[in-house]
Amino acid sequence: MKQRIIIITVLMLFAAMCMGTSLAQSTVATGTVTAWGLNVRTAPSVNAQRIGTLRMGYTAGIVGKNSDSTWYQIILEGGSGWVSGYYLAVTNAHTVPVTYN
C-alpha cells in the first residue's frame, strides 16, 4: 500500500511537471520570416544599420517590439537585432513587451 502511494505521488509530480513545461513553452513568442530575405537592423527603422539578412522560413525568439508593433526585436547568435513585423509571422505576440518607444 505504501509503495502504491509513492508510485502514484511520483506519477502525479511527473504529470504536473510536464504540464508546466508545455504551458511555459506555449507562451514564448517566436517569429518566422515570410519574405525571401529580411534585413536585420540595429534599431527599428529602415534607416538603421543593417547587420544581417534572414532567409524565408527562419524562426527566431522575440524579446521586444516597438510601441506600434511594426518592428520586433529578435534573438540572434551573439546578440539581438530588429526586423520589420510586416515580413514576420508572429506567434504569441501578446506576450512581447514594448522595448522601444
Image (tube, rainbow, N blue to C red):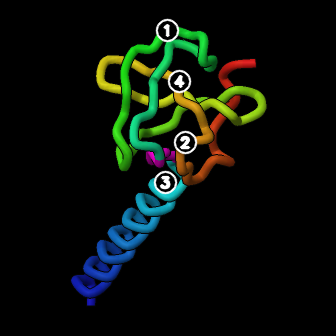
> Disc 2 marks which amino acid?
Tyr
Residue positioned 54% across, 50% down in the render: 89
Which sits earlier in the primary sequence, circle 4 or circle 3? 3
Which sits earlier in the primary sequence, circle 4 or circle 1? 1
Circle 3 residues within 10 Å: few <14, some 14–19, many ≥20: few
CA–CA distance between discs 4 and 1? 10 Å
* Span shown in magenta: 29-34
Q: Nearer the viewer, residue 61 or 14?
A: 61
Looking at the image, do the residues carrying marks 2 and 1 touch, with CB atoms under 8 Å apart?
no
Viewer-nearest of labels 4 and 3? 4
Secondary element under disc 4, as helix, strand or loop, is strand
Q: Nearer the viewer, residue 95 or 33?
A: 33
> Disc 4 marks which amino acid?
Trp
Q: Quadrant of the N terminus?
A: bottom left
> Disc 1 marks which amino acid?
Gln
Q: What residue would you read off at disc 1?
A: 49
Q: Is residue 30 magenta?
A: yes
Q: What residue would you read off at disc 4?
A: 82
CA–CA distance between discs 2 and 3? 26 Å
CA–CA distance between discs 4 and 3? 24 Å
